[in-house]
Amino acid sequence: MSVARQSVIDPRRRSRRLAVSPQRRKAIAPQPHLLGVRSRTRDVGVESLPNSQVKPVWLRSLLILQRGSDPLAFFLVAATLGIYAWTVYTQKLWTQEYTKLENLQRQERQMTAANEVMKNQLAKLAEKPNTGLVPPSPANTLFLPPAPQRSTAQTATPSPEPAPSTPMGY
């Protein structure tokens, strides 16, 4: 009895493989003329574009503009970020200083109020008879002699002495 050799390929795969037509296989296969390889059947070469070194003026100006726009854009972004940071920093400083100003104004109002309260208390104490304070009258007023007048006109200054030709000391 002879043993028949069985196919190792799955019958489903085999049917798929057979379903592809030879024309389809040809279309799927890489075509040598598209890869830049010369075909044996056709003698079609790869055509090269003309290598023109002279470029039109408008194209050269656009290329220069393109090369210059990158550093310009970087500079503008850096300047914008710098100005933004400076603005935020100055606003922060202004807020701190304004808070200090408000605190000082509040302290000034509190000190003014405390000063007025103290004046009021002193006035009430002065009105009491047992404090020993005497009400002001012309009899107990002190008169001080006026201070001598200061001259507002500047006295004539003597002319400056000429500088000595030799040094004064070493």
Image (cartoon, grey):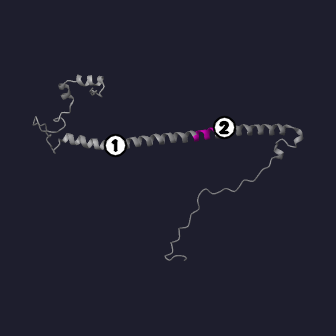
The image shows residue 147 at horizontal and vertical percentages of 71, 55
Task: Tell me which label, 1 or 2, sits earlier in the chain.
Answer: 1
Is disc 1 surrounded by few (<14), some (14 to 19) or many (20+) residues within 10 Å? few
**Residue 99 shown in magenta:** yes
Q: Which residue is mark 2?
A: 106
Quadrant for residue 21, please give it: top left
Does the magenta run of residues contain 169?
A: no
Which is more toward the observer, 137 or 135? 135
**Kind of residue indicated by mark 2:** Arg
Mark 1 → mark 2, Cα distance in angstroms? 50 Å
Q: Quadrant of the C terminus?
A: bottom right
Q: Residues within 10 Å of mark 2 (few under 14, many from 20)?
A: few
Q: What stretch of residues is rendered in magenta?
A: 96-102
Magenta stretch, overall SS: helix
Residue at the image position 66 percent from the left and 37 percent from the top: 106
Which amino acid lies under the numbered mark 1 shown in the image of this protein?
A: Leu
Figure quadrant of residue 138: top right
Compare residues 67 and 102 and report the one nearer the observer.
67
Q: What residue is shown with label 1?
A: 72
Question: Residue drawn at (60%, 39%), measured in percent from left and top?
Answer: 99
Q: Element at badge 2?
A: helix
**Residue 41 percent location from the top left of the image:** 10, 34
Relative horizontal placement of residue 120, taking residue 60 as reference (left or right): right
Quarter of the image for residue 16 reads: top left
The residue lying at 53 percent from left, 71 percent from top is 161
Where is residue 104 shown, x and y percent of the image? 64, 41
Q: Where is residue 4 shown, x and y percent of the image? A: 27, 26
Residue drawn at x 55%, y 67% is: 158
In the rendered image, the vertical position of residue 77 relative to residue 144, given as above or below: above
Left or right: where 19 falls relative to 97: left
Of residues 45 and 13, which is closer to you in this image? 13
Callout 1: helix, strand or loop?
Answer: helix
